[in-house]
Amino acid sequence: MSNAIRFLESLAQDPAYARLSDAQRQALLDQLDVEPAQRDALRNGDADALSQLLGGRERMMCLIIAPGDDPDSTTPSPDTDKPDEQPDAEPIGVPEPERAPD
Amino acid sequence: MDVRGSLVCVGTGMMLGAHLGPRARRHIEQADVVFAAVSDPLVELWLQQMHPDVRSLQPLYSQERSRRDTYADMVETLLAQVRAGKRVVGAFYGHPGVFARAPHVAIERARAEGYEASMEPGISAEDCLYADLGIDPGTFGCQHYEASQFMLFQRRIDPSAYLILWQVGLAGDRSLRRTHTTPAERQLLVDLLAADYPLDHPVIAYEAATLPITQVRRDPLKLGELAQARLEPYTTLVVPPCRPLQPNLALREKLAALAPQETATTTSATVPSAIS
């Protein structure tokens, strides 16, 4: 595991890190065996820069649900004989309750 | 040797390192292959260092195709490896079953095909929201909707409960290809809400922290400012109640009639006084 990622993991797992003073945090970062640019990114809280330095993906999508529902989870409305066959069209009828993002 | 494939969808939680449960971590470490759908590139790198074969589901997204197709491909990608006899883990950010359709579908289909499949919960954005904003959903009640679904379907709003709208940066999107909608589209959401809330009603734009070096976003806004606010795909809108709880006097009388010995009491109900 990269030392910078391990450092983030440690920060997240120990609430004591959140209570460190700037000087204490600086001392901790100074001891970290990472490239200077990674240390700067950690010091500045610059997640984009750190990700770029570590080879992280440039663009991330965080959407894992569609509005409405799946075409096959709807009940046809009374005035139609068949469910909507257009995959991106507005769903018809009563949607199955969506699982409550992320 | 058991060569039957299996599927477990686990939640990584919202913050790198802070929220991954021990069972979920063991599932990841013991899998043959791990597929990752997370919201932060550093979280993806973290997962990749937990297992030698972590494959990102990010390449399935494209502005050229509907996200519905992307989600269908996620399901097929997971199931293809299950059918190949692999122990498959789908690692989804937050909770894998909360506002995440693909894990539910993948598990249902794997089971229907005779494979062992289960879900391991994680700490969701909703969980973080309650902690970060100091909201207890039990106090006034809490309604949750995906913002576009809320706009596209008839809903009965209860203004005496919290209203939480997810993916509000995409409010009104029907293409499933965009990552943001326009102020004009969001204004339609404001107009819809204005039937139940005053335009100066305080609301909150919320974003959970995904790294220990980043901050929670909890920007107070007026409802009428929402269309022009900076809203990301991962922004959540929190609308506090604008009315006190309304006693259901008729039902109280019926309950009293069933238990004549009891004295009916009316608890005072208030609306939250402060928006953090």
Image (cartoon, grey):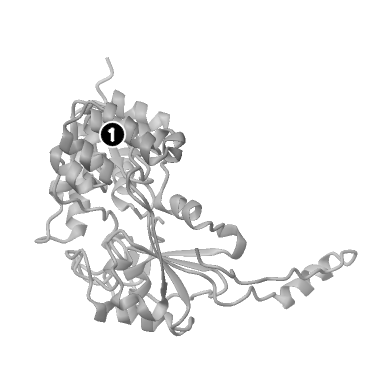
Say what amino acid the circle numbered 1 marks.
Answer: Val
Residue B169 in the image: state x and y as whole percent. 29, 67
Q: Residue furthest left?
A: B64
Q: Residue at x 49, y 54 (%)?
A: B130
Q: Residue furthest front?
A: A23
- Badge 1 crowding class, 10 Å Cα cut-off, few under 14, some 14 to 19, many 20 or more, is many
Is residue B258 visible from the viewing direction of this image? yes
Please determine whether, in this image, residue A48 is positioned above or below residue A87.
Answer: above
- Count the numbered circles shown: 1
Return the chain for callout 1: B
For the question of whether residue B7 can be seen, the reply is no
- To which quarter of the image does residue B63 belong? bottom left
Residue A19, how many percent across, how many down? 46, 39
Against B28, is B76 above or below?
A: below
Q: Is residue A9 above or below residue B269?
A: above
Q: Give percent across and percent down for residue A34.
A: 20, 29
Which residue reaches farthest right?
B261
Give the residue at x 17% y 34%: A36
Q: Please indicate whether residue B200 sits to the left or right of residue B8 in the image.
A: right
Residue under circle 1?
B89
The image quadrant of residue B110 is: top left
Q: Secondary structure at mark 1?
A: strand
Residue lying at 29% horizontally and 57% vertically, measured from the top left: A65
Quadrant (top left, top right, bottom left, bottom right) of the N terminus of chain B: top left
Residue drawn at x 16%, y 41% is A56
B154 or B124, nearer to the observer: B124
Q: Nearer the viewer, residue B216 or B98?
A: B216
